[in-house]
Amino acid sequence: MNQNSALAQWKLHLIGVTLLLLCPIIGFGTKALAVEDPVTISSAISCNSKSLGAANRPGGGSSQPSLHYIESARELSVGERREIDEVCPQAKFFSTQILLTPGATYKITSEGKWKDGQMKGVGPEGWWFLPLHPFNRIPFRRMFILSGSVGASLKDSFIIGRDKTWTAPATLRQDRVLMLFPNDWDSKYGNNRSLGPLEGGPLRVTVTRIS
């Protein structure tokens, strides 16, 4: 790495740290309205669900997330698809209720919009501002891009965007439900919003098993 490249990377890092320190002061990304804590796991089809227990909220109940959402999940057969009418952007792990099959390949497509804090509505490709990317739950990837994971863990997380063909790992643990979420800062899910049809929303996803 030459001196100019190292200097450029250091400047970007410095900008990112500065923005992180200033965010609570200038109000960027802070809550515009008083809302409940974001759900850690949601198996509801709508953001309006209030049926989740304390164990599924940050700092509440058990230190381990409940696995109740696995009970209603099932595998897709080859060629079968599931349409999800709304992915809630406040959920850190939104359950598709699809039980992943080890080694199976899925095509995931998305459309519509959702809202990140004070930003205008954005689509499943999210938005780009490099200094903020290192702090996302999937670091160094776009802000608010539609993302997925195997179960309620970031260990097997991946970027989806508008369209992705993805193969599940050959070995899966008990928690093998396909989860969806916007790639955001861990502390900022509370100010995310779903959008109505007049605003281009909500964000919808179709999952098809192709092999």
Image (cartoon, grey):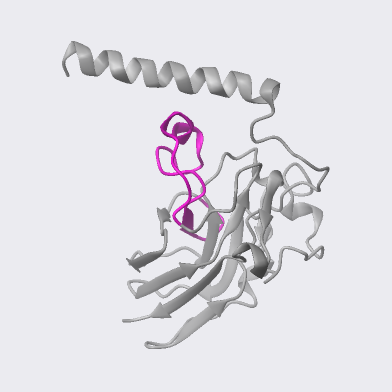
Instruction: Tell me if residue 128 is in the magenta stretch.
Output: yes
Q: Quadrant of the N terminus?
A: top left
Say which of 132 and 152 sits in front.
Answer: 132
Point out the image quarter for the C terminus: bottom left
Instruction: Give 49 or 142, whichever is nearer the viewer.
Output: 142
For residue 14, say whether it is visible: yes
Q: Which residues are magenta?
A: 125-153
| Residue 31 against residue 61 in the figure, above or below | above
**In the image shown, does 70 or 191 lie closer to the viewer?**
191
Q: Position of residue 93 (x, y in %)?
A: 59, 57
Where in the figure is residue 182, as x and y percent of width and height? 54, 52
Q: Residue 204: x, y in percent?
A: 55, 70
Q: Tell me if residue 152 is in the magenta stretch.
A: yes
Nearest the camera: 82 or 101?
82
Residue 188, above or below 69: above
From the viewer's perspective, tell me whether residue 74 is left or right of residue 158: right
Q: Is residue 80 left or right of residue 203?
A: left
Q: Is residue 96 left or right of residue 43?
A: left
Task: Give coordinates of residue 97: x percent, y percent.
Answer: 58, 74
Residue 128 position by quadrant? top left
Which residue corresponds to the image point at 44% horizontal and 16% vertical from the top-left? 14
**In terms of secondary structure, what is the magenta stretch mainly?**
loop
Extreme front residue here?
Answer: 198
Residue in the picture at 48% in, 76% down: 206
- Does the rendering let one see residue 167? no
